[in-house]
Amino acid sequence: MQEALERLFQLQQVDTALAEAQKALRELDDGTHAAQELATAEEELAARQKALAEQETTLRHKELELKSTEQKLAANRERAYGGKVSNPRELQGMEMEIEALGRTKGDLEEEILILYDDIEVQGAAVGEQEQLVARLRQEHQRIQETFEQSSRELAEEIQRLQAERDELAAGVDSSLLARYDRIRERHGNLAIVAVADGVCTGCNTSVPSTTMNSLKTTGGEQTCDNCRRLLYLPSK
């Protein structure tokens, strides 16, 4: 009987390791959260790039408008003050137009200066967002690579442990194995525990002397009075 319990205890070690490996596989970070962060950052980058492009387009239009206004202003000044206009009323009208063009020129110059400042700020923001996206993309790639490698390693470990379990389980009496599986299902995958210094290592409760004597002499199936797990007394 002691040999059967020893084999069952070995099976428990394998089942514990198998459960831990399966849990580790389930809890691996597959990069889903990192991918969501990256997608959000990329959307923000696209929005900032679009806003910057719109400002740059507006700036080009304003610069073209300013250039056209300056050309008109120069042409009107040349015509008004170049001796080509002699009619006072016509000259007065041209001077009013020159004044209006001057105001338009001033307004455009101010708008262009503001646009330059805005574009500089937005350009810096785009640069910072690009750096963030690059970092997040690199981190996402690292997580994926780690996930793939760890998944392979854990899958191989699970396969190895499962094969070892099958071999050990085949050498255990079917009724004892069924009892073991029932207890394991009820008690968090832990059905058989060692007794160390007269204490059940499953619940840290002292094992009665009568049970200890039975374990030492007959080696039969004994359970902890507290946690109801099977007890195993390792050979010294």
Image: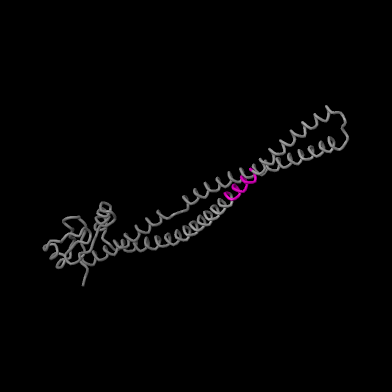
Q: Is residue 124 above or below residue 110?
A: below
x and y, in percent, of residue 114 in the image = 63, 43
In this view of the protein, which residue sits in the foreground, 9 or 79? Answer: 79
Write down the quadrant of residue 66 in the picture.
top right
Task: Identify the image quadrant of the N terminus.
Answer: bottom left
Q: Residue at x 20, y 60 (%)?
A: 204
As drawn, the residue found furthest toward the front would be 88
As drawn, the residue found furthest toward the left would be 210
Task: Identify the image quadrant of the C terminus.
Answer: bottom left
Q: Residue at x 23, y 59 (%)?
A: 202
Q: Is residue 73 above or below residue 87?
A: below
In this view of the protein, which residue sits in the foreground, 175 or 102? Answer: 102
The magenta region covers 114-125
As drawn, the residue found furthest toward the top would be 89
Q: How is the image coloured?
A: one colour
In this view of the protein, which residue sits in the foreground, 143 or 72? Answer: 72
x and y, in percent, of residue 154 in the image = 42, 60
On screen, residue 234 versus residue 114, left or right, reads left
Q: Residue at x 29, y 61 (%)?
A: 12
On screen, residue 1 versus residue 140, left or right, reads left
x and y, in percent, of residue 211 in the image = 14, 62
On screen, residue 223 versus residue 88, left or right, reads left
On screen, residue 173 versus residue 164, left or right, reads left
Q: Residue at x 39, y 60 (%)?
A: 158
